[in-house]
Amino acid sequence: MNIPHTSTTFDTGLVFERDVALTMSDGVVLRANVFRPQAPGRYPVVMAMGAYGKDVHFEDAFTPQWHVLKSLYPDLDRQGSTGRFLRWEVVDPERWVPDGFVVIQVDSRGTGRSEGYLDPFGPVETRDFYEWIEWAGVQDWSNGKVGLIGVSYLAIKQWQVAALRPPHLAAIVPWEGSSDFYRDGGHHGGIFSNSFTFAWWPRQVLANQFGSGQSTHRDRLTGERTTGPALSEDILKGNRADHPADRLAHPLDDAWNRARAPRLEAIDVPVLSAANWGGPGMHLRGNMEGFLHAGSAQKWLFAHIGTHYESFYLPHYVALQKRFFNHFLRGEDNGWQREPRVQLAIRRPDGTATIRQEHEWPLARTAWTRFYLDAPTGQLGAEPPAADGAASYRAMKDSVSFSTAPFEHETEFTGPASLRLWVSSSTSDMDVFAVLRVFDPEGKEATFIGAHEQVPMAQGWLRASRRKTDPARSQPHRPWHTHDEVEKLTPGQAVALDVEIWPTSMVFPKGWRLVLTLQGHDFIVAPPGRMRHDHPEDRPAEVFGGDNTVYTGGQKASYLLMPLVPSRTV
């Protein structure tokens, strides 16, 4: 299909090349937008590949988020940006090209103006990305060093393609994106995460499928609205995977899931991994695990707060991104190598946070502290309860909670957490939804702005039949479940579960309390919740709607393992 490549030069010195075509090794043509300085020279490249449409303007497709961003950053225009080239979750060319970067945004296979079979996160799409990186590395305007940057989908693709080691890839900045396809996004603790995937697929992906006729965009240069070539619905269906159904059809960490999970140890380029404390479900665990397990000798971890898009665009974060790339793509001696390898936003219940520099993750000085559950009293205590106890709840309706005493002094927990839990069910399986919550002295709960919505302090999940762990990969604070077989429960028979609770950071003021809530359904601060686990095929009521029992004390002592952080003296 003939889609012309156009080039426009602006008086700001920015050259915009639209619909640059590249033929993949299998003959399929993909297209990208390239933004580069007009002045002759060889420049470092920052690139992203995604399914959201390289020509779909942020303001048009994500209007509420645009208004939030503008309220947080009202002087965007004074920073040299009109916003006309701003796209969802990618860098703003008008803020990068003047600093001597080439910005490339690629429509992934089968989306926007790129032809081919649409299969998000699949290995063919990743190989396409490899080919684009190698193309960018040898262009006349390229200095041969390519960096990758972007949020969420665009971060996931970075982990995947970096593991293939493209020769011209020089550094990556995965900003809030899964590095374990199965555990971080598709199945939390083996429980299918359906609501986001089923809503995201038609709204953000199918709306941009190549040939859909829906990929209408407003041209910010001419003011005209143009629509991509329209194909019949039968042709469109035949030219794409059914991604939500594929996720549902692969409930274990099988070959299909593993084909989409990068070999992190193969990554050898410098990494700046940015995680969001408020991102349970997609935007947190993967960045922590990616930082830990990437094979790169030079890697940095940055954990922040706020929504998943505002942090990426605000001036402080953009300056951080550019400084990283200036060092590794341009060879600039800007002191980056002296940056501490870990920088964490240490959160407080009022929603504020203070950036603290550290040297490792988890923190070496962590005092791993057990809080034992006591069913009769509902307490979380420092010592195992003297007597056995049990607390039951209706899985799909009720919950049970355990609370610490009010903290006697300011107390910080920063790091991953875990839960050893003795349980039984009246049915053959059960899902555990574990929630860490924050309460003030008057009993009012504090919740937090998350990547997508209001969230509690931390969350963890586990399906009892997926309780098998790999001892070689597990640690007390982060069990690693194999998710490769199903071990059903015997109704009424107690078993021990090791539940992974995703990393967190919170400073409790004196008099505040930590509460652990356990239930058999999603914990939602404000309905309807975007990261739900309620698909009827994955969670039939006759299996997951029984009476669940938690055991405490004696031979069935259940406890919460928390990352208590002593005050640092040096």
Image: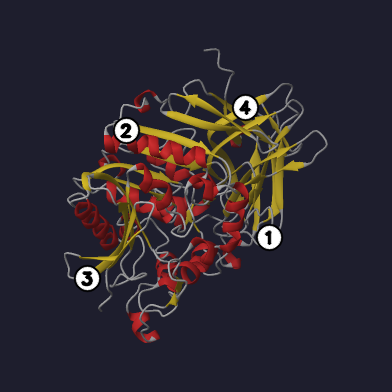
Q: Residue at 25%, 60% (x, y): give it.
A: 128
In the image, farthest residue toward the top: 569
Find residue 412 and name its label.
Answer: 4
Q: Which residue is mark 3?
A: 28
Sequence-first tag of 4 and 3? 3
Q: Nearer the viewer, mark 2 or mark 1?
A: 2
Q: Secondary structure at mark 1?
A: loop
The N terminus: image quadrant: bottom left
Residue 333 visible in this rendered orientation of the protein: yes
Q: Which residue is mark 2?
A: 327
Rendered view: 514 above or below 492: above
Find residue 400 and name its label.
Answer: none
Q: Horizontal placement of 430 versus 302: left or right?
A: right
The alpha-carbon separation of the residues under discs 3 and 2 comes to: 35 Å
Q: Which residue is mark 1?
A: 527
In the image, farthest residue toward the right: 442
The alpha-carbon separation of the residues under discs 3 and 1 comes to: 43 Å
Give the image location of residue 286, x and y in percent: 43, 45
